[in-house]
Image (tube, rainbow, N blue to C red):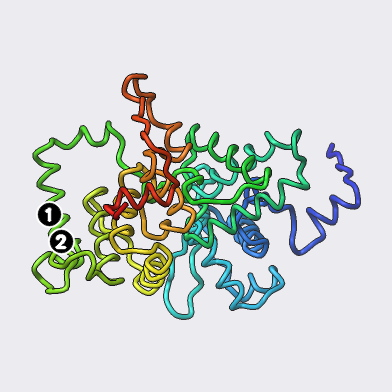
Amino acid sequence: MSTKVSVSDEKQFIYRDSFNKGHIQTPSMVENCLNLSNDAKTVYSNILNHIYEKGHYAFPSTYKLAISSSCSVNSVVSYINELVSKGLIEKETRGRGRSNHYHVKDVHQVPLLIVSEMFWRSMSKLTHLYGWRKILPAKDKILKFMEENNYRLQDMSTDEDSEKQLIELLKHVLRGGDLEVGLLPRNMKYQKPTAKEEQTISSTAAEEENAQNSRKKRNVPVGDKKNHWGLMAVSDWGVEQFKEYYYDKYLDKTGHAHPRNIKKHTGMMRNVIRNTGGKELLKKYIDGVFDIGYDNLTLDYLSSNRIGEVQTYLLNGKKPFYIEKKEPKKRETESVLVQPTETLSSEEMLKKMLGGND
């Protein structure tokens, strides 16, 4: 004898009588993902809905996605590209007149979601002190600063130290502090190899590899151009020479070619030269950047804030606090500095270091 199952009118409508049956099972971490637009989240959910119907991948037309997402076809294409660039889906183009295949990646393999969750944990630990009302503008300020400095959120390191640094960064901003690139957690895109990774290559092989990289990647080898920085006095250097000097220092330090953005870097270096006040001094600033031990050494981060840190380092040998915190403490006998016999202003001391007249 069959028994008729009674369901509520709501469930009857959701699961039996509607055209769009059921629910879309979008992970909460995607709905709350930082640095992912709301429209991209909507398109993601609609693609996900088709996957639950069809299997491991979906192939809805952009026109159907436009209807279900309440936007234009061009907008759908833009949001799909956002999802691809931020690692949430993979797109397989199947040719003219055929719908693309979309593969939704497992959430534990999406760097942006992992970083976003770390960001949420960090913010939640400060709610008892500041509340969400103050945390919101602090979060927005940090994300805007990262975007302006070409630091993608999904490239942020997510280890324990990075999470602690992110919490300190949030506190710093909440207290009214200014943002500096050096305060950001390590950028995985430019991270240095670990000691364990370096041990896998013998010293001889590593030297040969670096030599080959230098020959292949150095933009302007010495001797190839008469105006190369290595063949000119520093006093004769211009924007191009300082820029190439920085690129070469980066290559020597990291073993990798510096990412190129000629127009942007030319403008940045021109501003730095104008604001520094002397070519010899600027060369010392650049050398200081590589001596201090920053995690990220790209030219994009040679900002006015960093120049202030380098100036302090040149004057008294003091590195930024977040660099010193990561370095092992030196023995007390090694950390004693010789005190000057005369009191000099910062400007006088810097002039003395550069060989100026008394």
**Tag 2 secondary structure:** helix
Q: Answer few, some or many: residues within 10 Å of disc 2's Cα (few below 14, many 20 plus, some between 14 and 19).
A: few
Q: Secondary structure at mark 1?
A: helix
Q: In this figure, which residue is indicated by the disc labeled 2? A: 216
Identified at 35% across, 29% down, the residue is: 337
Q: Label 1, label 2: how many angstroms apart (C-alpha)?
A: 6 Å
Q: Are marks 1 and 2 in contact (CB under 8 Å)?
A: yes
Residue 120 is tagged as none
Position of the N terminus by quadrant: top right
Name the residue rendered at 36%, 56% in the picture. Answer: 298
Of 307 and 100, nearer the camera is: 307
Vertical order, 244 against 106 (above or below)? below
Q: Quadrant of residue 332?
A: top left
127 sits to left or right of 267: right
Q: Nearer the viewer, residue 356 or 125?
A: 356
Q: Residue 64: percent from the left, percent from the top? A: 64, 72
Q: Which amino acid type is shown beneath numbered disc 2?
A: Lys
Expressed as whole percent of the image width and height from the top left, the position of residue 170 reads 62, 43
Q: Residue 229 sits in which quadrant?
A: bottom left
x and y percentages locating residue 138 in the rendered image: 67, 50
Tag 1: residue type? Answer: Gln
Q: Residue furthest top?
A: 332
Query: From the viewer's perspective, is residue 345 above or below residue 78?
Result: above
Residue beneath label 1, please?
212
| In the foreground, 106 or 64 | 106
Going 43% across and 65% down the picture, which residue do you hit?
A: 275
